[in-house]
Image (spheres, rainbow, N blue to C red):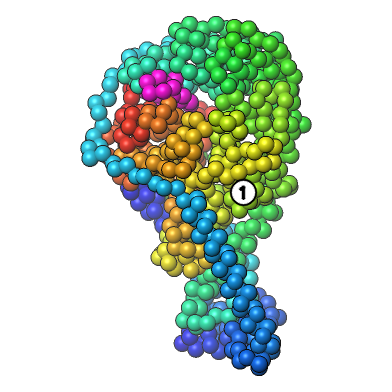
Amino acid sequence: MQRELVERARGGDRNAFAELAAASIARLFNIAQLMLHDRDLADDAVQETLVQAWRDLRSLRDPDGFDAWLHRLLVRCVYREADRERRRSTSSVHLPAAGVDPDASSNVADRDAIDRAFKRLSPEHRVVLVLHHYLGFSDDEAAAAMAVPAGTVKSRLNRAKSALRSALEADARASGLAMESVR
Amino acid sequence: MTLDRDLDRRLVVWLDERSVPSPPADLLARSLARVDSTRQRSVWRFPAVALGGAAIVGRRTVPAWAALLIVALVVAALLVVGGQIVRRYLAVVPQQTTLPTPASTQAPETPAPTDTRPPGVPAAAGMFARTVQIVAVGDRVAWVATSDGIYRTDDTGKTWRAVQPNGWTLPYTEAFMDADTAYVPIGSGSEIGVTHDGGASWATTVFDVPVVSPPGAAQPVFSFSSASTGHVTFVDPNHFSKRDGTGLFVFGTTDGGRTWTGPAHGLQPPLRASSNKLYAALGPFLVNSAGLSEQYAFENYFDLSEDGGATYTRYDFPTGALAPKKDMKTVDGIVRGADGHLLIALRVDGGRTEIPMVVYRNGDDPSSWTKVNELPPGYEQPFQFLTGNSWVVTAGAPTEIFSTSDAGAHWQTVVPAISLYGVQAGGGAASWGSLDTGWLAEECRMATLDDQGAPIAGQSCGDKPRDLVLLVTSDGGATWTQVGS
């Protein structure tokens, strides 16, 4: 079914493309907002992905590879949005609010800690973590989506987890300092 | 592995919780409206060439000879580029010699330290729980500066002495030069202490420099080329945080701090994307380089002083594929080689591109650099020049000790039995006195994991998992022994 839609869209059938877009848009938006940590940026990334998909659909040789190709376009657009955001925003340091419960065993505190740590990661690290840990992509699938060799996926995933761990530890230390200053 | 699994689990849970079931209601409509105003691109097909005829390229017609010419040029370019890549690969890939991990990884019995804690340090506290700096000297001597005291061993960690002088403040810029000589800041920052007998006695000198307030806010910086010759630099507190440069008061000695000359007044050249603080010296060198800024292009140079900041020389950073001009660069290590030329270990933040650390050799002018060798990607820190030819990298992820004694022509890789991740993550310190003997401090909870991240049986941190522990190796990093309490 999807193959037929892709072939029709590749031939210029706008309605077929609309069906493909409707079937994919929730997944694309979800992935983008996880990677970008921002719904507005995710909105822009998804729009851009669909426009590029339509524009370049004729270059897709294998209609069965539509989903993988769409992921690749999305990742590229996520990078672009992240770059734009990086240029727009000024550097800032987020300190944990004084009095926040630093108990790492608390689910809420843990979620907040991961939230803050994930935000500090580079877009490349966020992308590989979402592809691997949320979408469950294999190294080869992630490599296709990120347009890098599988070996790079492995090393990038390793570095992303190291960076996340470091950010979590730094956050925990900062929380401890904040608590000490309150006492 | 446990550490990884726990992180994986937390991450998966968090990602699931953050996922959203549906996009904004009008996103599809807005996207399709943009699609409506976008034309599909025609496809570039490889030409079906018939000599003498025309080739079809997409929807355009080009002469067959032109298509053949394009193909020939592309093939030629690929051959040239491919050849260069192969040559470059053969030129730079170091020959690795992996030492086998010893059959037995059981740590030797931990020697009991001599309990010589300075006054005020509770008996329950680990001596090295708050280690800031380690300096190894040869195979037996090490100085360890903690937030509670300065400790010294003469027997590879079997016994320790607390050797800090009266009035010693917080550790930051101490200079431990050899087995006997050390320079440390004292009091408010205008006074220093010098020992020439391994900390048994100290001589103090008070310098006529502006009073630093609050005490300890700006410690003097020691930059010494040998135990007897070097500089101590004080920072004018009124210039400390200004972006127009730093006022420096520089005193020099050639007799181990018995007499001093100066002050010479220096000014660290201001950089646009920098706090312009004076950072601790790398041996005799003060290095000043920029950070990244949203407003400015990276200032692709560094200022180097070998006279305590009285004068600076500007060096262009190396450039090339491994050092793109726009990327932020940091000098992680610097040393003068036997031929007098500078060697620098350069770390480049390539953003999306992973760039290995590269050691460069300076030529006859400040903009001339030649690549000596590069580390494989992933080996980032800490890098240490033991000499111009002997380098050590204490890598945490993967956990490996990576060393060379011939300037990177050949590398030796040692896989320790424990995780060194805590060192790589910046939560510790490392120092090598020789290619055999090295010291490191990392959080206890990291030191009780094996190189794969799994807990080591029988190892525990009690209720102090985040305290630093001190470890020493005498076999190049294969086995590590915890020392101290």
Q: What residue is shown with label 1?
A: B323
Residue in the picture at 43% in, 52% down: A158
Which one is in front, B416 or B313? B313
Residue A126 in the image: state x and y as whole percent.
51, 56
Q: Is residue B409 left or right of residue B97?
A: right
Q: Residue at x 43, y 43 (%)?
A: B410
Q: Residue furthest bottom?
A: B53
Give the percent coordinates (x, y) of residue A169. Answer: 46, 40
Report the span colored magenta: B124-144
Instruction: Please name the residue shown 62% across and 91% down the image.
Output: B51
Q: Chain of mark 1?
A: B
Residue B78 in the figure: left or right of residue B449: right
Task: Answer whether residue A173 is visible to the viewer in this image.
Answer: no
Q: Quadrant of residue B401?
A: top left
In this rendering, is residue B334 above or below A70? above
Q: Is residue B125 magenta?
A: yes
User: Looking at the image, can residue B380 be seen?
Assistant: yes
